[in-house]
Image: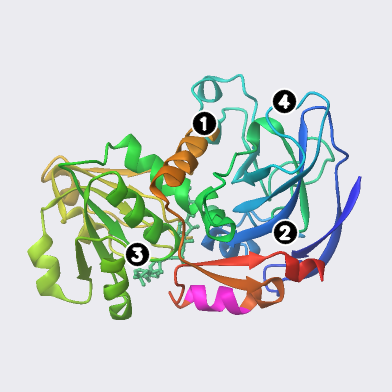
Amino acid sequence: MLTVKGYAAQRADSSLAPFSFERRAVGANDVQIEILYCGVCHSDLHQARNDWQNTLYPCVPGHEIVGRVTAVGDAVTNFKVGDLAGVGCLVDSCKTCPSCMEDLEQFCEKGMVGTYNGPDKVLGGHTFGGYSTHIVVRDEFVLHIPETLDLAAAAPLLCAGITTYSPLRHWQAGPGKSVGVVGLGGLGHMAVKLAKAMGAEVTLFTTSEAKVADGERLGADKVVLTTNPKALAASRGTLDLIIDCVAAEHSIDLYLSQLKRDGTLVQVGAPERPLPVSVFSLIMGRKRFAGSLIGGIAETQEMLNFCGEHNITADIELIKMQEIEQAYERMLKSDVKYRFVIDMASLKA
Ligand code: NAP
Ligand code: ZN
């Protein structure tokens, strides 16, 4: 066992604060990683504050983890000490159900194990995430990070990257397709970069006037400020696919109206309350309203390799662990450019 330092929320209404806990001894199939950087996902904030009513406390968030391997079990062949390693939102699944057999571990029919707030099958209790100095993970759930990428800026690929890459691939974003992205936050800015790299024509929808120029710089062909009814009217009915990354209540009907006939609106943002949809928004034009959850391990590796080839990382602001509450407050105000990443050296000092 290894005693590690972390940061945890003890209750929905308490700030994150220092918390020490044990990581399991390295088993035959385990990889132990010293965490160097961990991205800050809006899901961390939802979970720390119990927005989804399922948080187990103490809660150590963090599922955008990159670091170096410090130990491996006897049966591990794909990692060695000193390798770069990444861990995303999943640390285990049954590996035998139909979903797992199709490399869709995120939909494991026996229940996947989340990197935090999941059932810890080895130690009992629940899992603790990447706001900590080390983690021990089953080798099949550890990813290889391309050596050419900036390590801190690569951390957000482990959740924001795969969560947007997976639906873009599933709904075949590419040349000749018009793709919309709603919300320029952590997920949204990755969706813009990835859709553009796949060859799609990209339209960004933002509520923030100050982000229009950044949207274009990040690769959007068109940026629609959603407070401008004329701009919304001009893009009505033009999109094949929309990836909606908004973390709060907003109008689904508005974005369904931006789709072409047979277009698909994919919800990846996860607001705490149900979103109303008018049936007429769907039946007029045979449109689809769909959802998507992160991605499987093989697809996460494919995404990392794609990002390595296209030199894609997140635009980040590096913070100290001690600055997490200020980062959360800025996130709630849509003031993120465009992902906070925690430098774990600040926790070790
Ligand atoms: P984020 O960085 O906070 O970005 C969210 C963006 O949504 C904001 O920057 C803002 O963009 C827009 N927005 C916020 N409030 C809005 C409102 N009231 N109306 C319209 N737009 C608003 O969050 P994130 O980390 O990208 O995560 C986004 C959501 O995805 C969260 O709910 C998170 O839990 C969820 N998530 C889901 C999955 C999955 O597997 N499905 C995985 C990871 C995260 P503008 O300023 O451009 O409008
Ligand atoms: Zn996430």
From the image, state whether disc 4 or disc 3 is nearer to you.
Answer: 4
Provide residue 220's location: percent of width, then percent of height: 25, 61
- Which residue is disc 2 drawn over? 60
Task: Report the side of 90 relative to 252 (left or right).
Answer: right
Could you tell me if residue 292 is visible in this image? no
Task: Check if mark 4's residue and mark 1's residue have beta carbons within 8 Å.
Answer: no
* Amino acid found under the numbered disc labelled 1: Ala
CA gap between label 1 and label 3 equals 27 Å
**In 3D space, how far apart are the residues under numbered discs 2 and 1 (Cα atoms)?**
26 Å
Residue 77 is marked as 4
- Please, is residue 96 above or below residue 260 in the view? above
- What is the spatial separation of the Cα atoms under label 4 and label 3, in whole angstroms? 41 Å
Q: Is mark 1 within 8 Å of ligand 1?
A: no
Magenta-colored span = 326-332
**Chief secondary structure of the magenta span?**
helix
> Residue placed at 58% from the left, 71% from the top?
318
Secondary structure beneath label 4: loop
Disc tally is: 4
Q: Earlier in the sequence, mark 4 or mark 2?
A: 2
**Which residue matches tag 3?**
183
| Residue highlighted by disc 1 | 298
Judge by depth and name the residue closer to the eye, 81 or 332: 81
Q: Residues within 10 Å of mark 4 (few under 14, many from 20)?
A: few
Check disc 3 and report its element: helix, strand or loop: loop
Q: Is mark 3 within 8 Å of ligand 1?
A: yes
Q: Earlier in the sequence, mark 4 or mark 3?
A: 4
Helix, strand or loop at label 1? It is: helix
> Of the residues under marks 4 and 1, which one precedes in the sequence?
4
